Amino acid sequence: MNPFSSRCSKNFALLRYFGIGYNGNMINPVPRVAAIHDLSGFGRASLTVVIPILSTMGTQVCPLPTALLSTHTSDFTDYHITDLTRDMKGIIRHWKELNLRFDAVYSGFLGSPEQIRIVSDFITHFGKPEGNEKPLIVVDPVMGDDGVTYGPIGPEMIQGMKELIKRADIITPNLTEAAFLLDRKLPSEISLEEAKAWARELSDRGPRVVIITSVPLKEHPNTTGTLALDREDGRYWMVRCSYVPAFFPGTGDIFTSVITGSLLQGDSLPIAMDRAVQYVSITIRASFGHRFPLREGVLLERTLDTLRAPVTAATYELL
């Protein structure tokens, strides 16, 4: 069964209502996601945005924290951090004992090569198909932005992420991360045909769907593009939005969370992209006019309800 359309099936919806899967096993009353991200006590990023967004979109979030931080690391200094690698192993062991099942596995920032290996093993165990059902595997290869890697990201981490994306159904790198994965230099702008070639090359490495964000297209100045390729049908999709001169941390986590929630609701890939881009754009605009430190992240509390609204318009393009 196509993992992107299974939630649209009337039969599947009826079986979910009665709690019975296609293979006769009990299934989750609502989609359940294993969210493997760090947790920051202050600043809207990682799990502090993943959980409310997916919960608002009708999904149960089971957090598997990779680290505990006093704040996120963008524009904060002297923050306290506790590595939870050992705790991850204990949590996973207990989940295996409980025989938990997930509709999706969604990983974000990982702090060490060992954590990449843990996530790969997690996908092997919890991502295997059961009957006609297969969990959706989403990997956001968080490594850097604007051509610069984040603190703990070095050559070994980049190599590990190149291996991890082979296990994914969907990856959502920004252009910087796509360049790292492809061993390319980050261009100040890129042509549409070159961006499509990057997406195709990444998809050839394993993931069925590649979504590249923060794409500065030569053909469309003063806009930011999000480009996707679905290898199964060979179609490319594009959603563009106006550039806003502000950097808020956590917007990449917000984007991929909406993508994941939308697909689990049964949306098509271009609709999921459209919802994610528009939600990030709306939330940035709702935050930009206020006078508060940008490092605190966007004011998603003011916009979460919009994720419950039905899709009434779309701006995606088929390339």
Image (tube, helix red, strand yellow):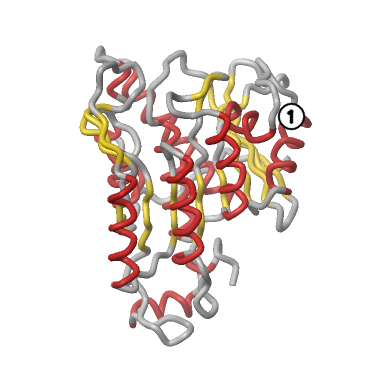
- Tell me: residue 138, above or below residue 146: below
- Tell me: residue 271, above or below residue 126: above
- Tell me: residue 138, above or below residue 195: below
Residue at horizontal 65 percent and vertical 29 percent from the top:
179
Residue 255, percent from left and from top: 45, 38
Residue 61, percent from left and from top: 31, 55
Name which quarter of the figure residue 34 lies in.
Answer: bottom left
Three-letter residue code for mark 1: Leu
Residue at horizontal 35 percent and vertical 81 percent from the top:
26
Left or right: residue 15 compared with residue 289 = right
Residue at horizontal 42 percent and vertical 75 percent from the top:
13
Left or right: residue 150 compared with residue 227 = left
Residue 252, percent from left and from top: 45, 34
Given residues 156 and 178, the one toward you in this image is 156
- Residue under label 1, please give it: 192
Location of the N terminus (image quadrant): bottom right
Given residues 263 and 51, the one toward you in this image is 51
Residue 133, percent from left and from top: 51, 73
Given residues 26 and 275, the one toward you in this image is 26
